[in-house]
Amino acid sequence: MSCQTNFVPKQNEIFTISKVYSIYDGDTFKFVKNNQLHTVRVFGIDTPEMKQENKTLILARLFAQKARSKTVTFLSQSPLALQYYKKDKYNRLVCRVTNDFKQDLAMTLVSKGLARVSYVSNNKYDKNFYINDKSTLYYVETLLHAQENAQFLGRGFWNPKVDLRKIYDRYVITLK
């Protein structure tokens, strides 16, 4: 008789998964652990949504597909290491994700101009994910630097020919 327990990681715990169950879009995927299906939201970024309510946002859908495709390729390089931060309002595990080559998924997407840095803040009164430790703050600053570089180089949706308002209604994040 086997004893199974619910999988509940501790904050900042790093755990590995060998296989992804499904990939919804560039920043959300599912995996199975202990016979339970878990949804992961990649920490610190936002990719365009696959399911657009507004059918006129064809450009957003295009970049959503590109981000998802890059994520599919990235997540196929298992095993994957996930660093758990917390659950979000949708009960998803918010995690930093690295592959077997020590590459970071958020960094990959941001540097290609397929994701923006989002949902993080160093203001504890902000509704976004509050950053309260130096290593996480450094990581977010590194993501922001990669985003600035992608903007400067015009990569992905930062290309000057792309009207970013057709993808996001707001897109800038700064740390104070």
Image: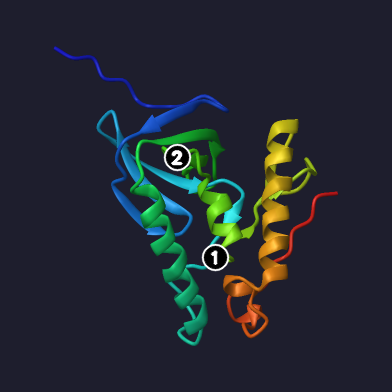
Identify the residue at image location x=47%, y=64%: 67
Q: Is residue 53 left or right of residue 6?
A: right
Give coordinates of residue 106: x percent, y percent: 55, 51
Residue 50 seen = no
Image quadrant occupied by the N terminus: top left
As shown in the figure, which amino acid type bears the numbered disc 1? Leu
Who comes first in sequence, dot 2 or dot 1?
A: 2
For this rendering, which residue is in front, 123 or 134? 134
Mark 2 to mark 1: distance in Å? 20 Å
Callout 1: SS: loop
Give coordinates of residue 29: x percent, y percent: 39, 50
For this rendering, which residue is in front, 145 or 130? 145
Give coordinates of residue 152: x percent, y percent: 73, 69
Q: Is residue 68 above or below residue 161?
A: above
**How dense is the environment of label 2, judged by Cα within 10 Å: few (below 14), some, or many (20 and up)?**
few
Residue wearing tag 1: 114
Callout 2: SS: loop
**How dense is the environment of label 1, judged by Cα within 10 Å: few (below 14), some, or many (20 and up)?**
many
Q: Is residue 25 above or below residue 32?
A: below
Give coordinates of residue 72: x percent, y percent: 36, 56
User: Residue 160's image quarter?
Assistant: bottom right
Residue wearing tag 2: 101
Verify CB contact (< 8 Å) between mark 2 and mark 1. Answer: no
